[in-house]
Amino acid sequence: MADWPVRSAEEADLPAAAAAWLRLQHFHHSLGLAFPLPEDAAEKWLGSFQRSLGRFSFLWVAGPVGQPGAFLLARVKQSAAFLGAVQVGEISDLYVDESLRGSGLGAQLTETALQKFRELGLHSVEVQVQVGNQAGLDFWHKQGFATDLTLVRKVL
């Protein structure tokens, strides 16, 4: 299964990717994610990037069409003017099914995103890792990412 090629997501992949994203969010909530999860969260997640796919957002998957076992969602954004107004890549979501972890699919998906960001000439790439997700943090460090800042939040 680890020899599945990484490819751009097709329309038929979106329902399975959204279901996997929802599993990822439940995991993040188990670690203490502070934001609520509305009933239609997966549909809203899809809506947050579908119109800009291929331009400012990218969804890559690995697995059979309609049944991807892993995905990565990446976006392009711009830093504030006082931070140079540079374009930055954001890997917003990475999911690899438990049965496929350790297969190299996460690293392949990450390298696909990094290559696209290099082609686009972006300044840097950022990833947020939920506190308590030590395996996730270790994965990103292994991919060459360094901890840059720590975000703190107070829920009101």
Image (spheres, grey):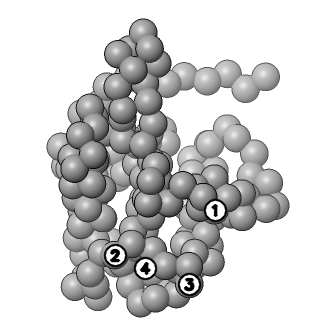
Mark 3 is on which residue type? Ala
Residue at the image point whose x is 62% and y is 42% from the top: 33
Residue at the image point whose x is 41% and y is 90% from the top: 64
Q: CA distance from mark 2 to mark 4?
A: 12 Å
User: Residue 148: x, y in percent?
Assistant: 31, 25
Q: CA distance from mark 4 to mark 3?
A: 13 Å
> Is there CB contact under 8 Å for labels 2 and 4?
no
> Of the residues under marks 1 and 4, which one precedes in the sequence?
1
Label ID, residue 12? 3
> Of the residues under marks 2 and 3, which one precedes in the sequence?
2
Circle 4 residue = 69
> Of the residues under marks 1 and 2, which one precedes in the sequence?
2
Q: Secondary structure at mark 2?
A: strand
Residue at the image point whose x is 60% and y is 58% from the top: 51
> Of the residues under marks 4 and 3, which one precedes in the sequence?
3
- The residue carrying pointer 3 sits among few (fewer than 14), some (14 to 19) or many (20 or more) residues within 10 Å by Cα, namely few
Q: Secondary structure at mark 1?
A: helix
Residue at the image point whose x is 33% and y is 45% from the top: 137
Q: CA distance from mark 1 to mark 2?
A: 18 Å
Asked which quadrant contains residue 110, the reply is bottom left
Mark 1 is on which residue type? Leu
Name the quadrant of the N terminus: bottom left
Asked which quadrant contains residue 2, the reply is bottom left
Nearer the observer: mark 1 or 4; the answer is: 1
| Pick the front one: 38 or 11 | 11
Circle 1 residue = 46
Label ID, residue 7? 2
Mark 4 is on which residue type? Gly
Picture layout, residue 122 above or below residue 18 = above
> Is there CB contact under 8 Å for labels 3 and 1?
no
